[in-house]
Image (cartoon, rainbow, N blue to C red):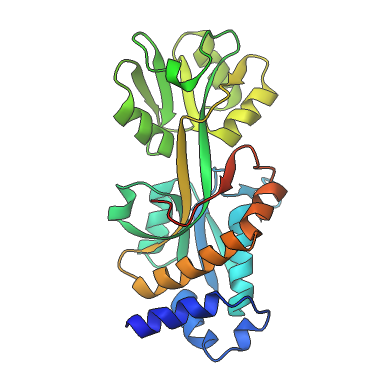
Amino acid sequence: MKQVLTALIAVFLVASPTLAADTSAASLRATLAPTGTLRAAFLGANPVQGRVDPTTGAITGPVADLVQELAKRLGVPFQILPAPDARGVIGHLNDGSADIGFLAYEASRAEEVDFAGPYANMHNSYVVAEGSPLKQSKDVDRTGLIVGAVKGQTQELFVSSHMTQARVRVFDRQPPQAELETLFKNGEVTAFGVNRQRALELDMASAELRSLPDSFLEVVQEFVVRKGDQQKRAALDGFAAQMRSSGFVKASLEKAGLHEAASVAPGDAH
């Protein structure tokens, strides 16, 4: 088994446009795309992973770039499946409708799936009312303050386990801009935790909201596979390492306009 895993990793570390013609490509295709199509699930509402065009359904961003490159090396077509949340990504892996997925690393999620190679660090920031006295993330955990976050998302898992003085209000979904403005205006929340890209976009779009300038949490975005699939995990770990070291991930983040919201992950991410 060790020899098989090593061979899989070695193939991915060879940057060759003729990878699909290599004698090892058949075993890689069988491992990563057993149906003949590489199927990948990601968080459709997370701009750090990718964006779904509401009109055409076209998917762009780091996930789309990585899946396209992986499929090219395997010599297979690909399908990218937007999921509403982490539970949806895990569900696609467990029911066999996806071969690989993308999630932010969380210890609780690692009990259900195997993380198989980091590619980016996602920054997270609090959104506050424009006139709020809060200046930095460290100011948020205070008695009398209410911190909002969406259930099951990385930000909610963090604030629910780390806030000692502020009260945490958990939402079933991400409130759209107008609703968020009303929540702040009515004093129903004092700060709202989101990924930094969303925070920056809200800051730009609304005269009533602003993003705090720092990141309260760095979270590693990774490939994920079904629990226990060691061959797939090893192959993806090698692929992710090459995508980081070659500059592919950096270029993808910059192309997507994510240079302020994410950075290339270190190899020893967790």
In the figure, residue 38 lies in which quadrant? bottom right
Q: Is residue 63 left or right of residue 172?
A: right
Q: Which residue shows up at 63% across the image and 66% down it?
A: 68
Q: List x then y, in percent, for residue 160.
A: 32, 29
> What is the number of callouts on the image?
0
Task: Name above or below for residue 234 compared with residue 188.
Answer: below
Task: Name above or below for residue 39 compared with residue 24.
Answer: above
Q: List x then y, in percent, for residue 165.
A: 31, 15
Q: List x then y, in percent, for residue 34.
A: 46, 79
Q: List x then y, in percent, for residue 162.
A: 32, 28
Q: Which residue shows up at 60% across the image and 24% down it?
A: 177
Q: Which residue shows up at 38% across the image and 75% down it?
A: 231
- Can you see residue 58? no
Task: Name above or below for residue 160 compared with residue 256.
Answer: above
In the figure, residue 59 lies in which quadrant? bottom right
Q: Which quadrant, please, contains the N terminus?
A: bottom left
Task: Name above or below for residue 102 compared with residue 182.
Answer: below
Closest to the observer: 266 or 193? 266
- Can you see residue 62? yes
